[in-house]
Image (cartoon, helix red, strand yellow):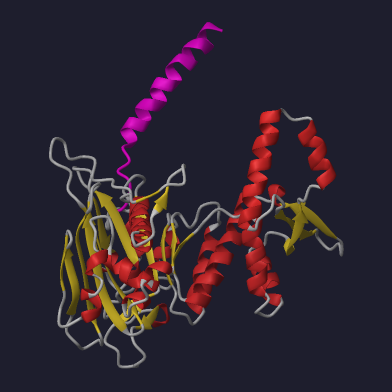
């Protein structure tokens, strides 16, 4: 996400630091392209797995189905194509900024323990990197005198990350630095509760915003509403149902009710029913559709809007695998223009197959990344800015021609042979008829 020195589409960048003379600028977009099975989704999975590990491998213990608390290691999925070679540990490292400070944090682990962990920091853009701590197994070294760390050595175990423990204990700067991982967001499937949250967030804006966002997409939608629907069951109905149930079920239900009562909960619940108001031609009347009746593209667009608004308002890092799924390219372009147009420190990393993104009037070259897999099954990421190209060159054409790689090697002669093999029995049957 670090910008190159090339001055193109400067509105796509944000300075790292409050000074206008900052020597480091960051891109707000990163678009990933590659053939199917090249490894794009694995890249997103890696970021999300690191987030999950960092935010969970602390003092808290997991509960198994029996309610017993126990420590367990995070998912360990080493490179599969190693043959008889031993499985190497998985290593993560990320460089990020929080409150003008730059951190470099990473760790290595396998299915048994965290073998290494390290954290370095710069307190300013022009200062050298300083070690905060380095850890191997349960042994810790730290740069300078840090009595706070020495006081918490007892928490270092093979199954914990020391960084996470320090953050949970609210020790600075670790408690502040972990917010980077907490602010990484991924797109989840759309449901009625998400729409309700979207409508609640829009109350802070001009009421016309939702109307404009819906009309821009040309879906025919005029408005959306989320109505809370009570699913309470009367006590009389519940008692009648229980009287007809077997004794074992009645005993189980009674025990479950008593447990919830002790927790301060009840069996009552609530849900949300969404209504989508559509206008038809010049008629003043509106027609309502349920969420199940809406098209997949409309729901996908609404879902993206909700995450975009949240990321822009809270300076989050948003991850979207296959952003163009179920969306017309013009809507994808519109969403990118919305994201860049809002003055925010939010960043967006996404994968796509929309070749218009290679248009240099829409995207910087250092925002374009290509994922390729070699003969050993390893994925490598290359920036388009590393290729020689004129500033006014047609990058879309060069990409589709394979000049930058990142496209499938389609063997059309095999496709032609498939056509022949499928056609042969069909032709023979027609002759017999």
Instruction: Please give the count of numbered marks on the rendered protein.
Output: 0
Tell me if residue 172 comes above or below residue 184 in the rendering. Answer: below
Tell me the quarter of the image containing the C terminus. top right
Q: Nearer the viewer, residue 129 or 250?
A: 250
Percent of width and height locating residue 205: 65, 79
User: Quick check: 19 above or below 196?
Assistant: below
Quarter holding the N terminus is bottom left
Give above or below for 2 relative to 318: below
Report if residue 75 lies within the magenta region.
no
Pinpoint residue 254: horizontal percent, then vertical percent: 68, 41
Q: Main secondary structure of the magenta part?
A: helix
Between 209 and 92, the residue placed more toward the observer is 92
The residue at 20%/75% (across/down) is 150
The percent coordinates of residue 169 (x first, y second) are: 36, 72
Q: Is residue 295 visible?
A: yes
Q: Tell which of 262 and 59 is nearer to you.
A: 262
Extreme-top residue of the structure: 432
Q: Is residue 216 visible?
A: no
Start-end of magenta stretch: 406-433
- Percent x, y of residue 274: 72, 56
Identify the residue shown where x is 53% and y is 73%.
Answer: 338
Q: Determine which quarter of the picture holds residue 346.
A: bottom left
Residue at the image point whose x is 28% and y is 47% from the top = 76
Q: Is residue 422 magenta?
A: yes
Q: Is residue 296 above or below residue 149?
A: above
Give left or right: position of 378 versus 327.
left
Residue 30 lies in quadrant: bottom left
Q: Is residue 208 left or right of residue 55?
A: right
Which of these two is toward me, 423 or 44? 44
């Amino acid at each position: 996400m670090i910008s190159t020195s090339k001055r193109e589409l400067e509105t796509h960048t944000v300075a790292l630091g409050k000074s206008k003379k900052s020597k480091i600028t960051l891109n707000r977009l990163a678009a990933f392209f590659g053939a199917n099975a090249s490894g794009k989704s694995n890249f997103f999975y890696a970021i999300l797995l690191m987030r999950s590990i960092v935010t969970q491998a602390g003092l808290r213990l997991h509960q198994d189905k029996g309610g017993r608390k126990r420590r367990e290691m995070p998912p360990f999925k080493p490179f599969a194509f190693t043959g008889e070679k031993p499985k190497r540990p998985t290593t993560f490292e990320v460089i990020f900024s929080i409150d003008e400070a730059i951190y470099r944090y990473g760790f290595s682990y396998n299915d048994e323990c965290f073998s290494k962990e390290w954290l370095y920091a710069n307190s300013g853009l022009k200062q050298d990197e300083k070690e905060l701590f380095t850890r191997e197994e349960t042994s810790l070294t730290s740069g300078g005198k840090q009595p706070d760390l020495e006081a918490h050595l007892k928490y270092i175990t093979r199954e914990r990350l020391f960084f996470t423990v320090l953050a949970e204990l609210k020790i600075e700067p670790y408690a502040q630095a972990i917010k980077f991982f907490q602010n990484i967001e991924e797109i989840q499937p759309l449901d009625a509760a998400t729409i309700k949250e979207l409508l609640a967030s829009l109350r802070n804006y001009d009421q016309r915003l939702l109307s404009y966002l819906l009309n821009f997409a040309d879906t025919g939608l005029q408005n959306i509403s989320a109505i809370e629907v009570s699913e309470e069951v009367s006590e009389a109905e519940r008692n009648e149902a229980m009287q007809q149930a077997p004794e074992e079920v009645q005993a189980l239900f009674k025990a479950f009710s008593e447990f919830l009562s002790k927790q301060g909960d009840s069996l009552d619940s609530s849900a949300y029913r969404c209504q989508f108001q559509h206008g038809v031609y010049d008629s003043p009347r509106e027609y309502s559709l349920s969420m199940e009746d809406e098209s997949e593209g409309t729901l996908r667009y609404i879902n993206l809007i909700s995450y975009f608004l949240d990321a822009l308002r809270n300076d989050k890092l948003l991850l979207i695998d296959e952003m163009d799924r179920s969306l017309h390219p013009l809507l994808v372009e519109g969403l990118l223009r919305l994201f860049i147009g809002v003055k925010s420190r939010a960043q967006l990393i996404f994968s796509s197959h929309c070749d218009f993104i290679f248009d240099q009037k829409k995207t910087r070259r250092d925002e374009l990344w290509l994922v390729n897999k070699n003969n050993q099954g390893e994925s490598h990421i290359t920036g388009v800015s590393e290729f020689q190209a004129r500033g006014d060159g047609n990058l879309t054409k060069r990409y589709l021609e394979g000049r930058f790689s990142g496209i499938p090697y389609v063997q059309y002669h095999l496709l032609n042979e498939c056509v022949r093999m499928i056609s042969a029995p069909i032709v023979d049957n027609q002759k017999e008829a």
